[in-house]
Image: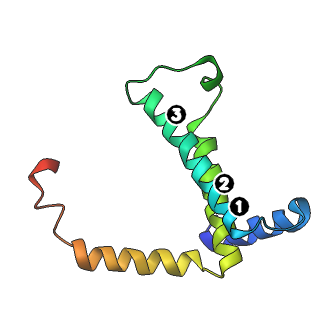
């Protein structure tokens, strides 16, 4: 699925199942919550924290998909074309950082 297809799919899902988009501030709060859930899994799976019983059912892929869903909602409701935005962002990073990371001794 392309980003364009994902944006259209989420938009159709909202129309079919969601009644309407939550407002932008609500979606921003939801995004923060979902990112927190990803952080919780990462801290336990890859960090030093231990899992609680309530955490063991959480799946990283599902939580990342929740983050992506809300990001797509925000893009749709604010008129952002994620394909164009990502390409522009990658172009910026390529121009700015074209050799920065290769010269970073911490990465070698």
What's the residue at 14%, 61% (across, down)?
A: 102
Residue 67 shown left or right of residue 93 in the figure: right
Does the residue at mark 1 contact the one at mark 2 (Cβ under 8 Å)?
yes
Residue 38 shown left or right of residue 14 in the figure: left
Q: CA distance from mark 3 to mark 2?
A: 17 Å
Give how far across and how far down residue 24 sits, in percent. 69, 69
Q: Which mark is residue 26?
A: 1
Q: CA distance from mark 3 to mark 1?
A: 23 Å
Residue at mark 3: 41
What's the residue at 24%, 77% (across, down)?
A: 96
Mark in front: 3 vs 1: 1
Q: Which mark is residue 6?
A: none
What's the residue at 83%, 64% (across, down)?
A: 14
The local secondary structure at tag 1 comes to helix
Q: Quadrant of residue 21?
A: bottom right
Q: Quadrant of residue 36?
A: top right
Q: CA distance from mark 1 to mark 2?
A: 6 Å
Residue at mark 2: 30
Q: Is residue 108 visible?
A: no
Query: For the N terminus, which image quadrant?
Result: bottom right
Does the residue at mark 3 contact the one at mark 1 (Cβ under 8 Å)?
no
Q: Is residue 98 above or below residue 14?
A: below
Q: Is residue 59 visible?
A: yes
What's the residue at 60%, 69% (across, down)?
A: 3
Q: Is residue 12 above or below residue 38?
A: below
- First in sequence: mark 3 or mark 1? 1
């Amino acid at each position: 699925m392309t980003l364009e297809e994902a944006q259209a799919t989420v938009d159709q899902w909202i129309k079919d199942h969601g009644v309407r988009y939550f407002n932008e501030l609500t979606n921003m709060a939801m995004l923060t919550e979902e990112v927190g859930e990803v952080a919780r899994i990462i801290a336990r799976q890859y960090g030093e924290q231990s899992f609680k019983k309530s955490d063991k059912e959480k799946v990283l892929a599902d939580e990342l998909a929740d983050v992506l869903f809300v990001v797509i909602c925000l893009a749709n409701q604010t008129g952002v074309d994620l394909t164009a935005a990502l390409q522009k962002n990658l172009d910026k990073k390529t121009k700015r950082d074209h050799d920065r990371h290769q010269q970073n001794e911490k990465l070698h």
